[in-house]
Image: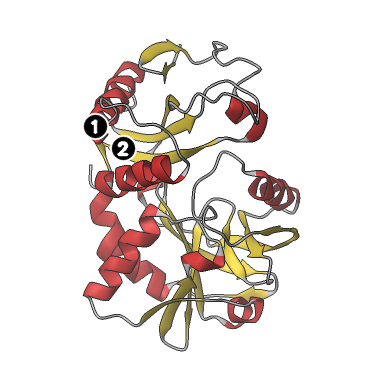
Amino acid sequence: MERLNYNGKLYSSDQLLISANNRSFRYGDGFFETMKMINGKTVLRDYHFERLFSSLELLQFEKPGYLTPKYFEEQITELAKKNKHSKIARIRLMIFRGDGELYGEQNNLPGYIIQTWERNETYNQLNKDGFLIDIFGDARKACDNYSHVKSNNYLPYIMAALWAQKNNLNDAIILNNDDRITDTTIANIFILKDGVVKTPALTEGCISGVMRRYLLKCMREEGMPIEETSLTVEDILEAQEIFLTNAAYGLRWVKRCGKSEYGKKFAEMLYNKFVASLYKL
């Protein structure tokens, strides 16, 4: 039986642990990190923990002194070893506020759950078949001080993912309140248009993705033309290439969005140049 880590102790993964008064269960009060482990090491570790601790501060959690990146890394490593997932693993670290009502006395100390899942080597490779995606029109994401956080309140993404599954798609694009592009249900989105790489700015409502941040840094260091900007639906449909990024699979190229089709030459180059080296076994 696989294990999970609940506030520093290991439990069977099917054991019920939180109460009905848990604020994350009630209100989505918290956030999460999705990470990738290769040979016992967390990929882009510093980026993940920098985002985690900045989210703790932004969401007004109290931070006890023992709660450090080193502490979490030790907890993750121990769990992955226990589950025999250290070679290639997906890690999920969820943070939540303690039990309570919306108003009244609050327990602002962070609780956490860590889970691991084994993955195979296909997660370390560029997809052979391009993703099929489309634009989800039934929800909009706000652009505010919290929109870049990987919040436990995930409703627009859940509904878009259900819609994508029903329509035999790999993913779906989320729009903001101005009908511009934010991200997808599980990834940040980039396009190549007229020789320039473009991705929605954080002010457009997208998640502040770790792989997004890493690739932006790499491309800028190489002098590649890159813009963090606003993207319209027309930009998506007129692009030469589209690719999606997240911490779990790195980069995936898109073959089709709606009726528009795309190539993969640039995405393939980026993967081989910047991403593949992160996943060497």
Q: Taking 148 as reference, is 236 left or right?
A: right
Other residues around mark 1 within 10 Å, as few (<14) / some (14–19) / many (≥20): some
Mark 1 = which residue? 40
The vertical placement of 137 against 20, above or below, is below
Mark 2 = which residue? 37
Q: Could you tell me if residue 192 is visible in this image?
A: yes
Q: Could you tell me which residue is drawn at 66 percent across and 17 percent down?
A: 20
- Disc 1 residue type? Gly
Q: Could you tell me which residue is drawn at 63 percent across and 78 percent down?
A: 237
Q: Could you tell me if residue 39 is visible in this image?
A: no
Nearer-the-camera pick, 80 or 158 = 158
Report the disc number at residue 208. none
Counting the numbered discs, the total is: 2
Quadrant location of residue 223? bottom left
Q: Could you tell me which residue is drawn at 50 percent across and 75 percent down?
A: 241
Q: Taking 143 as reference, is 155 left or right?
A: right
Quadrant location of residue 2? top left
Dot 2: element: strand
- Disc 2 residue type? Met
Dot 1: element: loop
Give the color scheme: rainbow, by chain, secondary structure or one colour. secondary structure
Q: Taking 183 as reference, is 47 left or right?
A: left
Q: Position of residue 264 (x, y in %)?
A: 45, 71
Dots 2, 1 in contact, CB < 8 A: yes
Q: Where is residue 200 in the image (x, y as percent from the top left)?
A: 50, 70
